[in-house]
Amino acid sequence: MIKGLTTVARVASEEAFTQLSELFQTLGFEPGKGWDDSTGKGAAFLAPLGNLELAIGYPPTQPTLMVEVTQLDEVHAAVKTWISAHQGTATKLSEPTLTDWNSRLFTVEPTKDLTVGFWQSENPVHNRPIAVEGDLSAAGKRFAIVVARWNAVITDRLLQGSLDALTRSGCAMKDIQIVRVPGAWEIPSAARTLAETKDYAGVIALGVLLRGETAHYEAIYNEVARAIGQSQQETGIPHAFGVLTCETLEQALDRAGLKAGNKGFEAAIAAIEMASIQEKLGAQTAELAGRKP
Ligand code: DLZ
């Protein structure tokens, strides 16, 4: 039933009215529908969010009109510019200071009897919808790993990395299905077969394509990436892409546990996170569907 909040600020003169309107527009308020009739006139400035706060112990020196902003220092500079352009009408501009409620705030008295507080929360997600994020727990979930035998010296290390990530995240070994395929080219079809069973929370694809050794390298890796993506889209099961595409064996070794981390480990972590996100989004969608009349 509640639609919005309106705060009315009394303005003493026509001049202050015009100047304040200019200030609020400069600061980015969206102009709303005003009025001008025999009773007086008003200008509306719309903000994307509004809330009513009841407070005990709120210092009487603090303004009751508070504007939350995202770039406090830029707003402060804009207010300062406005003050110097309209000297004489504006008084009392404080410097932004840290509050004891994890924010920075400055106040200004742009006209008599009106004090405005501009503030920015130091918490980046303040007043924003909480994002859905995946947990990194694989406990109780089943995962499939499809690993190419081609360049096994490297793919075995990727496999080790994936197993390490899964088991350290709580997945039991009995819940991990490993499927070995001849080469990267064969990964998508095995991945799809596994995904279609819907027995797995995620599929992890591991392989190594070396440019120097692979004829039609571009064509192969494009098709492998495309088909793994297609399997993911069409089955709805998260597929983590752990297929290395490298210029040399040395580069591949670096990415399989030497200098540049272990991409098998990273792929498994991505699969675990995506499996959790799928679960949460599924629950959210079901809840929303349940609420529909
Ligand atoms: C044939 C081939 C070549 C030349 N290079 C690679 C490679 O670098 N990495 C890889 O995983 N597989 C390679 N393959 C094998 C193909 O992926 C595929 O297994 C065969 O062409 C049989 O279909």
Image: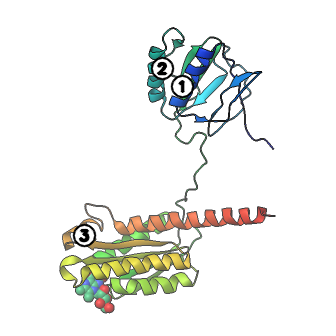
- In percent of width and height, residue 93 lies at 51, 15
Q: Relative to 130, is 72 on the left or the right?
A: left
Dots 1, 2 in contact, CB < 8 A: yes
Q: Which residue is labeled 3 in the image?
A: 253
Q: Residue at x 45, y 86 (%)?
A: 190
**Residue 64 in sight:** yes
Q: Residue at x 47, y 33 (%)?
A: 71
- In percent of width and height, residue 44 lies at 66, 31
- In percent of width and height, residue 169 lies at 50, 63
Q: Quadrant of residue 279?
A: bottom right
* Distance (Cα) linking label 1 and label 3: 62 Å
Which one is in front, 58 or 42?
42
**Does 237 appear above or below 121?**
below
* Distance (Cα) linking label 1 and label 2: 9 Å
Mark 3 secondary-structure assignment? helix
The extreme top residue here reads 88
Please identify the quadrant where the C terminus is shown.
Answer: bottom right
**Residue 151 in sight:** no
Label 2 within 8 A of ligand 1 by Cβ: no
Which one is in front, 246 or 260?
246
Q: Which residue is labeled 1 in the image?
A: 22
Q: Amino acid at mark 2?
A: Trp
Mark 2 secondary-structure assignment? helix
Mark 1 secondary-structure assignment? helix
Q: Residue at x 51, y 63 (%)?
A: 273
> Which badge, 1 or 3, is on the more N-terminal residue?
1
Q: Which mark is residue 82?
A: 2
Q: Relative to 126, is 76 on the left or the right?
A: left
